[in-house]
Structure formats: structure tokens, C-alpha cells
Amino acid sequence: ALLHSSMLLGTFTDRQSILELMKVKPQDAEKFFLDHLGKDIQFLAESLSGNIDDATMAVHLFLGYILDSTADTNMTIKVMREKEDRVQWESCLKAITQS
């Protein structure tokens, strides 16, 4: 859900960069990511034995936790064009979510 929502947001801010990440380029990238996000939320709802609202709230609370946890750090949201940037960000996120 986080990946697909990030990529959906990216189609509005830097569409070309998002399309460059994809091997197969859909005609309507926004619909493609929105459909996948919907499937992610449905899967999360089933995994939580809940409904769509429960899953959406879980994602919302998780994102809020991440924002609160990173408020005092130098972790910033940026375009990650290089693999090393992504690996560094993933390491920071892993450290935050495991604390």
C-alpha cells in the first residue's frame, strides 16, 4: 500500500520519473496505481480480519507514527533517483519501525 500510494503521488509530481521506473508502462498510470492501492487495502483488510475502513485507518495510523517518529531526525522525503538513496531510506524506516 505504501509503495503504490507513493507511486500514485509520484504520477502527479514527477510522472516521467515514475514511468521510467516501470518496465511495462500503462496507458493510465494513475488508474493503474489506484487500482493496485485498492487491492492492497482489500488484502490488508482481509489480513486484519476487518473491513476496508479498518485497513485504511491502520495505514493512516502507521503513516502518522512514521511522521511523528521522524520529526526530530534528518530523514526527509526526497526523490530517490539512485538505488543507494532508496537503500538508505529503507534502512532508516526499518530502524524507526523496529524501535
Image (spheres, helix red, strand yellow):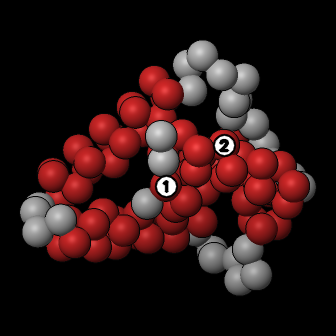
28 vs 61, nearest the viewer: 61
**Does 43 sit left or right of 84 as displayed?**
left
State whether residue 62 is above or below residue 22. Answer: above
- Residue at image point 48% right, 45% down: 97
State whether residue 33 is above or below residue 11. Answer: below
91 vs 52, nearest the viewer: 91
Mark found first going from the N terminus, 1 or 2: 1
Q: Quadrant of residue 18?
A: bottom right
Amino acid type for the residue under numbered disc 1: Leu
- Residue at image point 76% right, 81% down: 23
Numbered-mark total = 2
**Does 9 sit left or right of 58 as displayed?**
right
- Residue picked out by circle 1: 2
State whether residue 72 is above or below residue 41. Answer: above
Secondary structure under the numbered disc 2 in the rendered image = helix
Q: Quadrant of the N terminus?
A: bottom left
58 vs 22, nearest the viewer: 58
State whether residue 68 is above or below residue 31. Answer: above
Q: Is residue 77 visible?
A: yes
**Does 30 sit left or right of 17 as displayed?**
left
Percent x, y of residue 77:
68, 34
- Residue picked out by circle 2: 92
75 vs 30, nearest the viewer: 75
- Residue at image point 76% right, 54% down: 86
Q: Residues within 10 Å of mark 1 (few under 14, many from 20)?
A: few
* Label 1 vs label 2, nearer the camera: 2
